[in-house]
Image (tube, rainbow, N blue to C red):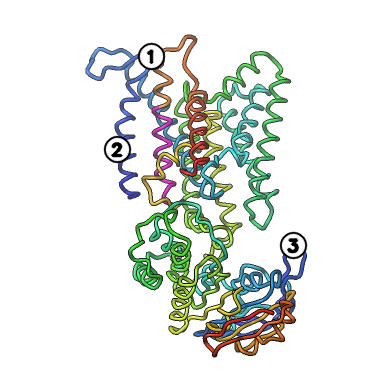
């Protein structure tokens, strides 16, 4: 189920935040969206999730215009994880994960059990969300998305509040999903994580796509210099590269 | 968990209802075969009064649970949407014009007032279904209706009309008949049905508006269900009983810990707990020895509700709520 967008233009508060961006993403891979602050990363992800109506262009899900899909159909296919979710009511982890089944309108007990297992939350299922650590809460929110068994996972900075160990654990969970055929798109600030864990990187700057390709090409020294305005060097071998600034 | 809460509340209502029929200025002894006018007191006075308390309480409780889910705020109250002041304005105008003296006019005027507030709310909130704008629109309507009510009271054609308006605004289910039950019950049930239909969307809102939309929640559909649901439950309640505050705020808090805390799970238990609260409060109003007549139900609920609200605020300040 390909997720593609052609000449996609998004406008928020009368400002063009995404300007004629085109790409076609394949399932079974991890795509990272990178760029400096205000580049339009979160807006592009929201556009891909069907949460922003395109001012021009369109988003296609397997050839079908996303805007024409019923919200429930869209919600079943695309699992969107926003940045910094606050859970309004102090429910248990299991009840939080159940929310992922809302678009399916079923109990989805097996899917919920699989999601809890994938996020390593089985022992925390009855714990109230308010008692979870930052890492546990991030896993619970991801499990909510996994419970919906979407064809695409679209996550906005899912690793931002996590320590190194939890970042790698979550990336392993997402890689396992990609290996099962799910498409994964992540907004990432940490370029080293994008370099080492993504299959493809889209780099945005001021709403425009300035690089698109394998991490080694899309996050080259030149792209980083133009996009972030810093000189940098990649050290180490592919798969375990470290970024040195200056 | 929710099933147990519902059974518990139903059992409490089943216990409280017959007791409420016996309690009052004249205590009915069911074992006394010679009690005069017992059937009239029971069937024409106490039964409709008890059923009306149950109906209005159920509507306000369900509306409060839905409002708190919609606004993701445990301090939200159905009054925030301006529908109760709208209905009260309609009722005040029926007193002002003198129509209140004729049969169905008072509840009809109040329902028209609630309908007007609902229409204005939908018109101002617009097409995007944004919750912040919607809430501000509700506050504006509440403020406008309140100002118009004050104007109507200050320009009352007679001191008698002014007195009637003020007493009516205090809220009560005393001296009501089956007519009020027939008006309020179907509208309240329809309103609760709309709020239940909004349950999945309210659950999705637990994660915030953006995540809720990604789960298929349609803001405009939810907004319409909320306007309809709150409008019917609160509008019907005000039309037959005047302003009774704090029920919608208090009740969801009292039953939340008995549920799995999803907003959809809270609506039915809140309706039942609201019904029970109003029934018991009305009995207390009836039996409390008070010089000069009965304590008004609206005043009693405010006397209980205001300290409850304060405790809630203090708990939230300590990060315990």
The image position of residue B79, as x and y in percent, is 58, 37
Image coordinates of residue B80 in percent, x first then y, are 60, 40
Residue B20 is covered by the magenta coloring = no
Q: How many marks?
A: 3
Closer to the eye: label 3 or 1: 3
Residue at 37% from the left image edge and 70% from the top image edge: A120
Q: Earlier in the sequence, mark 1 or mark 2?
A: 2
Q: Label 1, label 2: how many angstroms apart (C-alpha)?
A: 26 Å
Name of the residue lying farthest toward the front: A246
Q: What SS does tag 3 mark?
A: loop
Q: Are marks 3 and 1 in contact (CB under 8 Å)?
A: no
Which corner quadrant of the image does residue B102 belong to?
top right
Q: Label 3 to label 2, Cα distance in Å?
A: 53 Å
Does label 1 lie on the same chain as label 3? Answer: no
* Left or right: B48 in relation to A36: left
Residue under label 3:
A13
In this view of the protein, which residue sits in the foreground, A74 or B112? A74
Q: Which residues are magenta?
A: B263-280
Secondary structure that dominates the magenta span: helix
In depth, the one of A39 and B265 nearer the eye is A39
The residue wearing badge 1 is: B25
Dot label at residue B15: none
Left or right: B131 in relation to B275: right
Are marks 1 and 2 in one subunit? yes
**Of the pair A221 and A233, the residue shown nearer to us:** A233
Q: Check disc 1 and report its element: helix, strand or loop.
A: loop
Element carrying mark 2: helix
Q: Quadrant of residue B30?
A: top left
Which residue has dot 2 on it?
A: B11
């Amino acid at each position: 189920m390909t997720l593609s967008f052609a000449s996609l233009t998004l406008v928020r508060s009368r400002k063009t935040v995404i300007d004629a961006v085109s790409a076609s993403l394949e399932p079974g891979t991890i795509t990272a969206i990178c760029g400096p602050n205000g580049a339009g990363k979160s807006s592009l992800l929201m556009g891909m999730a069907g949460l922003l109506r395109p001012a021009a262009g369109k988003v296609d899900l397997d050839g079908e215009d996303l805007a024409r899909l019923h919200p429930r159909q869209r919600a079943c296919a695309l699992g969107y994880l926003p940045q910094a979710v606050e859970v309004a009511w102090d429910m248990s982890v299991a009840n939080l994960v159940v929310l992922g089944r809302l678009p399916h309108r079923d109990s989805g007990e097996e899917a919920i059990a699989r999601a809890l297992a994938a996020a390593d939350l089985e022992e925390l299922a009855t714990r109230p969300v308010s008692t979870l650590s930052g890492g546990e809460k991030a896993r619970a929110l991801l499990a909510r998305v996994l419970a919906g068994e979407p064809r695409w996972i679209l996550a906005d900075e899912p690793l931002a509040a996590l320590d190194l160990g939890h970042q790698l654990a979550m990336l392993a969970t997402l890689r396992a999903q990609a290996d099962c055929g799910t498409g994964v798109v992540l907004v990432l600030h940490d370029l080293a994580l994008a370099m080492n864990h993504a299959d493809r990187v889209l780099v945005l700057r001021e709403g425009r796509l300035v690089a698109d390709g394998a991490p080694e090409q899309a996050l080259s020294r030149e792209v980083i210099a133009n996009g972030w305005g810093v000189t940098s060097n990649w050290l180490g071998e592919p798969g375990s590269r470290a970024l040195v600034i200056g | 968990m929710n099933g147990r809460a519902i059974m518990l509340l139903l059992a409490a209502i089943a216990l409280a209802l017959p007791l409420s029929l016996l309690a009052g200025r004249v205590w009915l002894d069911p074992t006394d075969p010679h009690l005069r006018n017992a059937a009239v007191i029971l069937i024409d006075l106490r039964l409709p009064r008890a059923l009306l308390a149950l109906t209005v309480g159920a509507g306000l409780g369900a509306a409060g649970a839905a409002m708190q889910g919609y606004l993701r705020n445990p301090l939200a109250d159905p009054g925030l949407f301006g529908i109760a002041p709208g209905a009260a304005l309609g009722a005040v105008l029926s007193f002002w014009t003198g129509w209140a003296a004729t049969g169905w006019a008072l509840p009809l005027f109040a329902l028209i007032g609630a309908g007007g507030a609902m229409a204005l709310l939908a018109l101002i909130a617009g097409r995007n279904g944004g919750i912040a704008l919607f809430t501000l629109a509700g506050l504006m309507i509440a403020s406008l209706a309140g100002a118009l009510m004050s104007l109507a009271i200050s320009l009352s054609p007679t001191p008698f009309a002014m007195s009637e308006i003020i007493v009516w605004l205090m809220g009560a289910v005393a001296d009501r008949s089956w007519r009020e039950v027939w008006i309020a019950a179907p509208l309240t049930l329809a309103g609760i049905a709309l709020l239940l239909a909004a349950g999945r969307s309210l659950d999705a809102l637990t994660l915030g508006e953006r995540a809720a939309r990604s789960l298929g929640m349609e803001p405009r559909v939810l907004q319409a269900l909320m306007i309809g649901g709150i409008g019917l439950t609160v509008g019907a309640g005000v039309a037959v009983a005047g302003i009774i505050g704090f029920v919608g705020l208090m009740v969801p808090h009292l039953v939340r810990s008995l549920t799995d805390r999803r907003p959809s799970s809270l609506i039915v238990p809140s309706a039942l707990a609201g019904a029970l609260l109003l029934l018991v409060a009305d009995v207390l109003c009836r039996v409390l020895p008070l010089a000069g007549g009965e304590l008004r139900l609206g005043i009693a609920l405010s006397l209980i509700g205001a300290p409850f609200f304060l405790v809630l605020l203090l708990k939230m300040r300590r990060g315990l709520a």
